[in-house]
Image (spheres, helix red, strand yellow):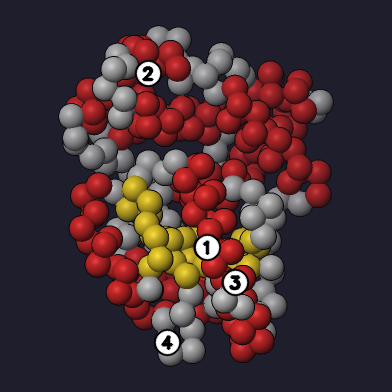
Amino acid sequence: MIKAVIIEDEKLLRKELILTTPWNQLGCELLGEAENGLDGLTLILRIKPHIIITDINMPGMDGLTMIQKAQSKEYQPKVILLTGHSDFEYARKALRLGVIEYLLKPIDDSELYSLIKKTVENIASKNDYDQISEKFGVQEIFRTQLNGNSDHYIQQAVEYIQTNFNSDISLQDSSHHLGISPGYLSHIFKKSTGYTFLEYITLFRIRHSLLLLKEQNLQVSDVAYKCGFQDPGYFIQLFRRHTGVTPGKYRTGITPTPESKE
């Protein structure tokens, strides 16, 4: 199994990548996560993953410095770089460090899926997996707070949100769909993702709105409705709270800067 780690300081994006990416289907095993470059470097040196998915701008140490410090003659992992538009040229320079690809934020799930799949196939075709496994004998096992049925229910809840986020869904709707009580779902969802069900779906909708705002033919109100917000004014209020700018200003090219990062 190809081993991967995620280093990303945006908690929502990091959790979404962990929960919504079909790792087993892609032939991957997610071994760990980190929220900054320093912790990321420690994680990489301990686990020696085959694939590193990382941001550029992070507290403590930027992604490219982290990669440079982690690499050695014997260890050359495949790297997928997540970057904002402002770092585009900077990201291109990362190619000399062995970064095989980079994705612009907000991340398109289908593009990420295709890129991870291509990376896994590239590793397999060159027998990199066997060579690295034999050299480092990695036996680390990544365990989240999820286990047993909880894991199954969270995966299903996230899939339910992904499929129905543009509708007026609730915790009760999701729990009924899963066949469990709202209280139990609320408990395991918060424990597993770090967010309440409402917080998660709100942030998921905001993230999806970033993609739709690229389509200039859509009015802001259209974007709101397509993302499951019944009141465009409330959508604008939430968008500004979470990004620091209005949807209109974001559309004109101002990169959102969250008021705080967990």
- Residue type highlighted by circle 4: Ser
Image coordinates of residue 250 in percent, x first then y, are 23, 31
Image coordinates of residue 212 in percent, x first then y, are 37, 26
- Judged by depth in the image, the label closer to the viewer, 2 or 1, is 1
Look at 42% across and 56% down and name the residue there. Answer: 8
Circle nearer the N terminus (3, 1): 1
Q: Which residue is mark 1?
A: 119
Q: What's the CA distance linking mark 3 and mark 2?
A: 42 Å
Q: Which mark is residue 223?
A: 2
Q: Is residue 217 above or below residue 194?
A: above
Is there CB contact under 8 Å for labels 3 and 2? no
- Judged by depth in the image, the label closer to the viewer, 3 or 1, is 3
Q: What's the CA distance linking mark 1 and mark 4?
A: 20 Å
Look at 64% across and 44% down and name the residue there. Answer: 191
Is there CB contact under 8 Å for labels 1 and 4? no
- Judged by depth in the image, the label closer to the viewer, 1 or 4, is 1
Q: Which residue is mark 4?
A: 72
Image coordinates of residue 249 in percent, x first then y, are 19, 27
Look at 74% across and 38% down and name the residue there. Answer: 153
Check disc 3 and report its element: helix, strand or loop. Answer: helix
- Judged by depth in the image, the label closer to the viewer, 3 or 4, is 3
Image coordinates of residue 41 in percent, x first then y, are 43, 74
Circle nearer the N terminus (1, 4): 4
Circle nearer the N terminus (2, 1): 1
Which quadrant is home to the N terminus?
Answer: bottom right
- Residue type highlighted by circle 3: Ser
Q: Is residue 5 above or below residue 21?
A: below
- Residue type highlighted by circle 2: Val
Is there CB contact under 8 Å for labels 3 and 4? no
Q: Which residue is mark 3?
A: 125
- Judged by depth in the image, the label closer to the viewer, 3 or 2, is 3
31 vs 96, nearest the viewer? 96
